[in-house]
Image (cartoon, rainbow, N blue to C red):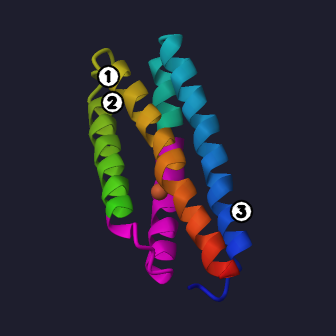
């Protein structure tokens, strides 16, 4: 475990990222609904920056804590990262119109990951500290 950072601070940092991902994700969905693809593209870059650093930090924490669910969790991070890179590739090529459904589905999956995989990891960290 990372002794330099108390568990409560780790969870605060992870939760702060989650709040930002929800906020930027909602902006992306709103932009898609308004057919404002250029705004969605800009917000998606912000989403990617947050997500990349968040995944990196969480992967290190899971490794340090010897988290039993790490393998599946890291696999999910890699899958979400791969999807986002593919979406960005399409956006960079200017083929916006075919993309909005994929982009909305990605945001939905990424936010579901927080509830389904990140929250159980937070519970594990808390239990490990109190145990
Ligand atoms: Fe995660």
Residue 95: in magenta span? no
Residue 36 appears left or right of 69: right
Q: Position of residue 5 (x, y in %)?
A: 68, 81
Which residue is located at x 30 percent, y 59 percent?
75
Magenta region, main secondary structure: helix
Indicate whether 30 appears above or below 118: above
Q: Position of residue 99 (x, y in %)?
A: 32, 22
Q: Which residue is mark 2?
A: 91
Q: Which residues are magenta?
A: 45-71
Q: Earlier in the sequence, mark 2 or mark 1?
A: 2
Residue 114 appears left or right of 126: left
User: Secondary structure under badge 1?
Assistant: loop
Q: Quadrant of residue 71?
A: bottom left
* Residue neighbourhood size for the residue with mark 3, other residues' Cα within 10 Å, grouped as few (<14), some (14–19), many (≥20): few
Whole-number angstrom distance, CA of label 2 to CA of label 1: 8 Å
Q: Quadrant of the N terminus?
A: bottom right
Whole-number angstrom distance, CA of label 3 to CA of label 1: 34 Å
Q: Earlier in the sequence, mark 3 or mark 2?
A: 3
Q: Earlier in the sequence, mark 3 or mark 1?
A: 3
Indicate whether 102 appears above or below 68: above
Q: Which residue is mark 1?
A: 99
* Residue neighbourhood size for the residue with mark 2, other residues' Cα within 10 Å, grouped as few (<14), some (14–19), many (≥20): many
Q: Quadrant of the C terminus?
A: bottom right
Indicate whether 79 appears above or below 75: above
Residue 31 appears left or right of 102: right
Q: Position of residue 25 (x, y in %)?
A: 55, 34
């Amino acid at each position: 475990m990372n002794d330099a950072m108390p568990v409560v601070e780790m969870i605060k940092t992870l939760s702060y990222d989650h709040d930002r991902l929800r906020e930027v994700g909602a902006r992306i969905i709103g932009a898609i609904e308004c057919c404002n693809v250029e705004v969605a593209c800009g917000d998606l870059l912000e989403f990617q920056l947050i997500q990349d650093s968040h995944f990196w930090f969480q992967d290190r924490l899971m490794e340090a804590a010897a988290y039993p669910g790490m393998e599946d969790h890291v696999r999910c991070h890699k899958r979400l990262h791969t999807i986002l890179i593919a979406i960005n590739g399409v956006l960079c090529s200017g083929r916006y119109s075919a993309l909005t459904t994929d982009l909305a589905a990605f945001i939905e999956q990424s936010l579901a990951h927080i509830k389904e995989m990140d929250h159980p990891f937070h519970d594990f960290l808390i239990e490990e500290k109190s145990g």
